[in-house]
Amino acid sequence: MPATMPPSPPGPDVRRRLLLRGGVLADPEVGIPAPGEVAVAGGRIAAVGAPGTLSAPGAEVYDARGLLVTPGLIDLHAHVYDRATELGLPADRAGIERGVTTVVDAGSCGSDRWADFATSVVAPGGTRVLAWLNVARHGLVRGSGELAGGAVDLDPEATAGVLVRERRTVRGLKVRMSRSALGGSGLAPLRVAREVAAVCGVPVMVHVGNPPPELGAVLDLLGPGDVVTHAFHGKAGGLFGGGPEPLPQLRAALERGVRLDVGHGSASFAFGTAERALAAGIRPYTISTDLHRRNAAGPVYDLTTTMAKLLALGMPLPEVIRCVTLHPADVLGMRGELGTLRVGAVADLTVLEERAAAAPRWLVDAAGERRPARRWLVPVAAVRAGRLVPVREAAA
């Protein structure tokens, strides 16, 4: 298990200067990783250059020889409301302790409890915490049937108020469209979420799983920028609808700009589904964990383990890195600020060791299926708003 680290203040250290030297820069806006160095000042990326070209008198120097330097990893789907929900993990356990600089809580909190979530989760830790606000007013605080009560579970006016007031932190709405969450509410909560999101100019993240409702009907209601999480689950009624070809509604949704997210979770990522999807040209736009208390000890563990599973299925390393940096930043409306090595961006960085072995490391999906991995990534350090944070390897 990793050592418990004292949280770093979440704001930038405007006095600290840092130079990461000797590493391989994996810039998701460039493509192929290449040797280079990064200078940080005032909590921002101050310069990026070829090896040996940057000078930073008085700066702390981090030796990244043999290591991969990426923008700070972003986990687009996790559960970190640890003081009020059964599933919640401490944000730093899901985040900075695993080399992840930004964690987006996916609907643990609704409008009723936003003030408490902001005070107890967003403010204190070393990890940047953003949120998908649950369209259900009480989020997951009362358990997993948050939409089974129908209209009484929804407060569109209060939900819109939080979205408007807390735009820096609340980046969109979350709605769970599966039998366990909905009871008999059907598609109505999704329609409410889409209406509120459209008025407020934010995307919707939709959890999909066991029907009803059918996935095709859900997809038909989604628009550009909306996200389908748990997209590669192995349950009935998924991307292929029980047939040999992807659902026609899926192709149409992707053409409209709907994005697919992994959202691994305890029961929502199947190697077989992902392999079929990749073979059909259907690729995840983002890779996330759905990390929570029940899966942190396996099969999910952390974001880099989830990344390793997609690498094991043949996704190229630059694409996998885009799926945890540039693409989630795009979903969040924060492109240019997060998920990039551009000069002027927030100095959130992750330093990774790429490991390879002749004997495979066996990775397990949510259904217990195994695939061999001969290369994987291990976080060794992170930079959060200009502050260097060592990362101790987790025991898998």
Image (tube, rainbow, N blue to C red):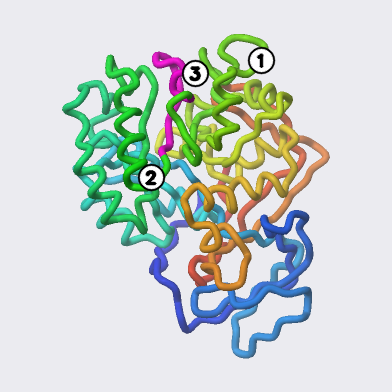
Would residue 80 be seen by someone viewing this image from the given angle? yes
| Residue numbers of the magenta segment | 204-219
In the image, what residue type sits under mark 3? Gly
Q: Compute the Cα span from label 1 to label 3.
A: 13 Å
Query: What type is the residue that disc 2 sits on?
Result: Gly
Task: Report if the CB atoms under discs 2 and 1 are less than 8 Å apart.
Answer: no
Vertical comparison of 233 with 348: above or below:
above
Is 220 located above or below residue 389 in the figure? above
The count of marks equals 3
* Image point (75%, 43%), residue name: 316
Q: Quadrant of residue 105?
A: top left
Query: At which x and y percent is residue 239?
Result: 57, 20
Residue 216: give its label.
3
Q: Is residue 152 shown left or right of residue 185?
A: left
Residue 20 seen anywhere in this rendered image of the structure: no
Hey, which quadrant is residue 153 in on the image?
A: top left
Choose the circle earlier in sequence order: 3 or 2.
Answer: 2
Earlier in the chain: of badge 1 and badge 3, it is 3
Residue visible at 30% across and 27% down?
189
Picture coordinates of residue 388, whole percent (x, y): 54, 70
Q: Secondary structure at mark 3?
A: helix
User: What SS does tag 2 mark?
Assistant: strand
Question: Residue 137: x and y, percent?
Answer: 22, 37
Q: Which residue is mark 2?
A: 172
Of 85 and 165, the residue lying toward us = 165
Which residue bears the numbered disc 1? 245
* Crowdedness near tag 2: few (<14), some (14–19) or many (≥20) residues, C-alpha within 10 Å: many
Q: Quadrant of the image for the C terminus?
A: top right
